[in-house]
Image (spheres, helix red, strand yellow):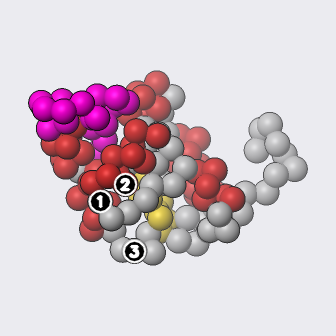
Amino acid sequence: MEKADHFKIPALKRKAIIPGHCHQKAIMKMNCEEEMFKDMEMNAEILDSGCCGMAGYFGYEKGDKYDVSVKAGERMLLPAVREADKRTIVIADGFSCREQIEQLTNREGLHTAQVFTNGLA
């Protein structure tokens, strides 16, 4: 670790699916996250899911915007979350992504920080 050389990344030998926040994927990429999950010995699958559909406030608006939001999520993200084994961790760092997952599936998306602090690691 470049900035916190005293920090040891905990091992987490579990499967995880990670949609990656669309803004993060577009601007910063997911390279650091991929490396971190590999260091955690996690079986991590970063989904090529595009946008979750929520897009901040967009997915909350009634009518066409809500419908578009759901359709975008149903392209890949939401079916992947529903089909994932119950022991598979769903890691979604974007607030909108976590909200879309919680509202339209029976799962909860966790922020990477929650994975470290909730005793999962």
- Which numbered marker is on residue 4? none
94 up-or-down from 82: above or below: above
Hey, what amino acid is under mark 1?
Answer: Thr
The residue to which callout 2 is attached is 102
* Magenta-highlighted residues: 47-67
Residue 45 seen in this snapshot:
no
Tell me: 86 left or right of 68.
Answer: right
Q: Is residue 78 magenta?
A: no
79 up-or-down from 15: above or below: above
The residue to which callout 1 is attached is 105
- Which numbered marker is on residue 86? 3
Q: Position of residue 100 (x, y in %)?
A: 33, 46
Q: Residue at horizontal 15%, vertical 42%?
A: 71
Compute the Cα span from label 1 to label 2.
Answer: 6 Å
Tell me: 70 left or right of 35.
Answer: left
Residue farthest to the front?
A: 62
Q: Position of residue 28 (x, y in %)?
A: 51, 28
Compute the Cα span from label 1 to label 3.
Answer: 12 Å
Find numbered disc 1 in the image and state the secondary structure of the residue it sits on. loop
Find numbered disc 2 in the image and state the secondary structure of the residue it sits on. helix
Pointer 2 local density, CA inside 10 Å: few below 14, some 14–19, many at least 20: some
Q: Which numbered disc, 1 or 3, marks the residue that appears first in the sequence?
A: 3
